[in-house]
């Protein structure tokens, strides 16, 4: 297999794009494509202050690397979740994120959930009985809340996450199985700013997971290989496996599924329930918008465990 650009031996082959590239040209191709998606979906410009949520995994570290290469103003934020039994998942991912930032002279904000709110994720999950063995829903709630809070408090107007195509297709698959109209409407590469919350963007949403792994490996980024220990057996991993089976027999199926959905959404196939829009108001404690009558679900949880 030869590189399509220079004819040298290819390092990476993408069946779904009918494209093979050598290392050098692959490391050019990924940022070029990212820049194209940023423009196509109107994500941000070089004037915006971007906060990249970095987990220490291949996607978010690569995203930060790419945005810096492209000349965007991007600082990082790491959220310490306190998931440290066995493989020391949180401390290892924090170490790798900090080393990444130091080696490149980048600014990284580190937020420790336990120091900030008195409880780690496993503690919160246990005390609220929201998943004794699976704290993932509590974790998702806390991460969303903290990302919004830091972006607002530190004056960033764009919040970028490392979600890739496999992540987005799996979420889409789940929402489609249940025809979740409101969720479907809000899923996309860009969620506009609202109620004092930063605009949310996913610049890697059109890259396959294996493309991001190749980018991280070929550019020598050190990232945490392990998944969160609680992710094992999750529904989203099951959906990813199903979609991978489909992709094996029909290369490109995953990308088509996602892109056709975006088209359908643009064409007005999904509509928000009017009562959801009307019922949004700021939480009386933290100010983030919520449909709950007084406190948002994050603040209610924190109150409950106190
Ligand atoms: P996940 O929900 O683990 O699939 O992660 C999706 C995205 O959320 C990642 O690509 C990151 O941008 C962000 N993220 C996940 N965990 C953290 C963390 N501990 N700190 C900061 N950002 C995170
Ligand atoms: Fe949050 Fe696994 S439970 S990353
Ligand atoms: Zn080449
Ligand atoms: Zn709140």
Image (cartoon, rainbow, N blue to C red):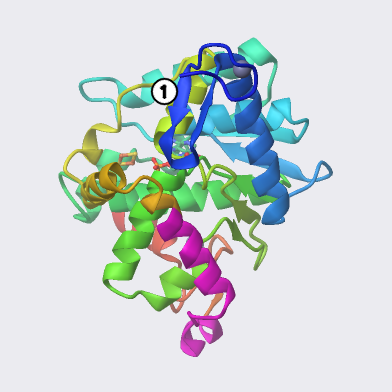
Q: Pick whichever, 230 or 46, lies toward us.
A: 46
Residue 27, quarter of picture: top right
Q: Residues within 10 Å of mark 1 (few under 14, many from 20)?
A: many
Any part of residue 306 in sight: no
Q: Can you name the residue that lies furthest to the bottom here?
A: 274
Q: Residue at x 72, y 56 (%)?
A: 42
Disc 1 target residue: 93
Disc 1, ligand 1: is the CB inside 8 Å?
A: yes
- For residue 114, side relative to residue 147 (left or right): left
Horizontal and vertical percent position of residue 145: 49, 53
Asked if the stretch drawn in magenta spans residue 261, the answer is: yes
Horizontal and vertical percent position of residue 259: 50, 59
Horizontal and vertical percent position of residue 15: 42, 36
Asked if the stretch drawn in magenta spans residue 272, the answer is: yes
Residue 172, quarter of picture: bottom left
Examine the rendered structure and indicate whether residue 189 appears above or below residue 209. below
Q: Can you name the residue that lies furthest to the right here?
A: 47
Any part of residue 76 in sight: yes
């Amino acid at each position: 297999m030869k590189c399509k650009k220079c004819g040298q031996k290819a390092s990476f082959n993408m069946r779904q794009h009918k494209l093979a590239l050598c290392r050098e040209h692959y490391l050019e191709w990924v940022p070029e494509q990212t820049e194209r998606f940023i423009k196509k979906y109107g994500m941000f410009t070089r004037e915006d202050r971007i906060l990249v949520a970095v987990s220490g995994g291949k996607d978010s570290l690569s995203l930060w690397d790419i945005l810096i290469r492209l000349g965007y103003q991007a600082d990082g934020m790491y959220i310490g979740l306190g998931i440290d039994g066995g493989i020391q998942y949180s401390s290892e991912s924090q170490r790798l994120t900090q080393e990444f930032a130091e080696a490149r002279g980048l600014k990284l904000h580190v937020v420790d959930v336990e120091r900030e709110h008195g409880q780690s994720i496993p503690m919160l999950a246990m005390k609220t009985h929201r998943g004794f063995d699976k704290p993932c829903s509590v974790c998702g709630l806390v991460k969303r809340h903290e990302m919004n809070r830091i972006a607002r408090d530190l004056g960033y107007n764009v919040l970028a996450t490392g979600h890739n195509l496999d992540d987005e297709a799996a979420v889409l698959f789940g929402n489609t199985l249940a025809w979740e109209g409101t969720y479907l409407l809000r899923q996309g590469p860009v969620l506009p700013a609202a109620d004092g919350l930063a605009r949310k963007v996913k610049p890697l949403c059109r890259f396959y997971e294996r493309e991001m792994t190749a980018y991280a490996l070929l550019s020598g980024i050190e990232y945490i290989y392990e998944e969160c220990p609680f992710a094992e057996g999750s529904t989203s991993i099951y959906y990813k496996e199903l979609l991978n089976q489909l992709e094996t027999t029909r290369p490109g199926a995953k990308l088509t599924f996602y892109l056709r959905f975006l088209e359908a959404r643009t064409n007005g196939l999904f509509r928000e329930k009017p009562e959801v829009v009307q019922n949004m108001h700021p939480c009386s404690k933290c100010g983030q918008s919520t449909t709950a009558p007084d406190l948002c679900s994050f603040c209610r949880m924190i109150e409950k465990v106190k």
